[in-house]
Image (tube, rainbow, N blue to C red):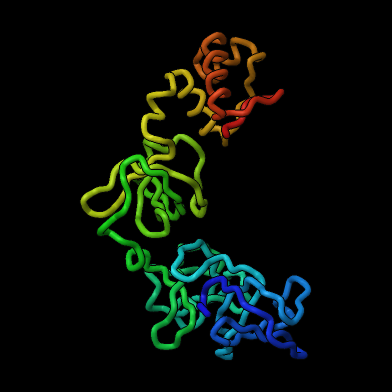
Amino acid sequence: MEIGLINKLKVNRVADMGFYLIDDANNEAFLPNNLVTDKVSTGDELNVFIYTDLDNRTVATTSKPTILLDHFAFLKVTQTKKGDVFMDWGMPDDLLVPFEEQSQKMLVENWYLIFLLKDEETGKLIGSNKVNDFVFFDDIDLNKGDQVDLLLYKTTDLGMNAIVNNLYKGLIFASDIHKNINVGERIKGYVKEVREDGNIDILLEPLGYKESIDKNSRVILDALSESDGFLELTDKSAPEDVKFILGLSKKAFKRSLGNLYKQKLVEIYEDGIKLV
């Protein structure tokens, strides 16, 4: 039975307050009635999240938390107490982020990047905001052009910082951002370069993408990005409107819009075009 992760357990016996579940080694966890989302009977096998509650009991729930052991996620602070911080992670009891695991002042109602780990002394799950302690800067198993999973977590003068594949730190340079992205989002990206210091430069499109997009199409994409992904222009718009908004002729606009549509980069509606 692994605390902090989803486990497949069998319902062993029923009590007034809930159900007792066991794993293959007969380790037991309690599933309270208020943490059950579906009908449960003895002998059922359930996928449940395991954690320890405030009374140090091993507890199961059929609800999935917003973060799992050894993973990063964005969580919101619900309260602070004597330097410690408590965060909403989708469980009945808030997640503790001890003072010594905070890399910055953390304020109530604000969101922060958190790594979930098991406290070595107590065995309880806790959170940490010390990102560099839980990412790898050596033996990076990535190559130029690889597609990766990104968790965007910080905007800087250089661009957007991201956690890469839940293992590494990456940066999307501002000059490479041509669509709306926001802190807290999980998106796909592509490795531009793995640097000697262990940081990773990331692109939002596959390598060679820019070269495959003609100059006028790039004008349209940039205008969409600056307009929250939507422009009130179509192939039926007046030439003077196209010229005013994009600086393009109607002919050039229609040709590039068609190319973007074929590449599934935009959607065309009666009242405008939308960035995919």
Q: Is residue 243 at least partly visible in the picture?
A: no
Q: How many numbered discs, if any?
A: 0
**Residue 30 spot, x, y in % from top left:** 64, 85
Identified at 51% across, 75% down, the residue is 4
The answer to whether residue 264 is above or below residue 130 is above
Identified at 54% across, 15% down, the residue is 253
The answer to whether residue 49 is above or below residue 256 is below
Q: Is residue 225 at least partly visible in the picture?
A: yes
Corner quadrant of residue 189: top left
**Residue 118 spot, x, y in % from top left:** 44, 78
The answer to whether residue 24 is above or below residue 114 is below
Residue 132 lies left or right of residue 83; in this view the side is left
In the image shown, does 99 or 170 lie closer to the viewer?
170
Identified at 57% across, 32% down, the residue is 275
Question: Where, quadrant-wise, is the C terminus in this rendering?
Answer: top right
Corner quadrant of residue 208: top left
Q: Residue furthest left?
A: 196
**Residue 73 spot, x, y in % from top left:** 49, 62
**Residue 223 spot, x, y in % from top left:** 51, 27
